[in-house]
Image (cartoon, rainbow, N blue to C red):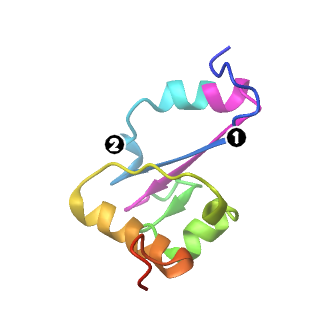
Amino acid sequence: MFFKNETLDLVFIHNAQSENDLIAKAELDYYDSTQDNFKRHYVCDVASETWDGASGYLSEEMMVDLVPDFTEREIYCCGPEPYMQNVKKILNSHVGSPNGEG
């Protein structure tokens, strides 16, 4: 089993420029299909005509739609600085900044 802690509830948002840029897609699809406590979402900045997932830049509306309880979760983020600043802005708009502002 991938997750030893079965009470863990993990939501993974994988954002890429296009569906061809989704790193480790096969592995993430496998975990999503075999682990009840793992849910993955793909977001492509630029989607092809056949793409049926979320598309565009990660937004507050998209975050609420993909992970409605994100304000109650521990969140880890990695990526280019502009992407991480965007995620931080989304989080701060819902829960305030870590230093109590916003």
Badge 1 amino acid: Asp
Q: Residue at x 71, y 27 (%)?
A: 35
Q: Quadrant of residue 61?
A: bottom right
- Which callout, 2 or 1, points at the residue further toward the start of the chain? 1
In the displayed structure, 53 sits above or below 6; it is below
Q: Secondary structure at mark 1?
A: loop
Q: Quadrant of residue 4?
A: top right
Q: Is residue 24 left or right of residue 11?
A: left
40 part of magenta stretch: yes
Q: Residue furthest bottom?
A: 102
Q: Position of residue 78 (x, y in %)?
A: 33, 48
Q: Which residue is mark 2?
A: 21
> Quarter holding the C terminus?
bottom left
Q: Position of residue 92 (x, y in %)?
A: 46, 76
In the displayed structure, 73 sits above or below 61; it is above
> Quarter holding the N terminus?
top right
Q: Which residue is mark 1?
A: 9
Question: How far, Cα to Cα, is label 2 from label 1?
Answer: 26 Å
Q: Residue at x 45, y 67 (%)?
A: 58
Q: Residue at x 75, y 26 (%)?
A: 6
Residue numbers of the magenta segment: 31-47
Badge 2 amino acid: Asp
Q: Residue furthest top?
A: 1
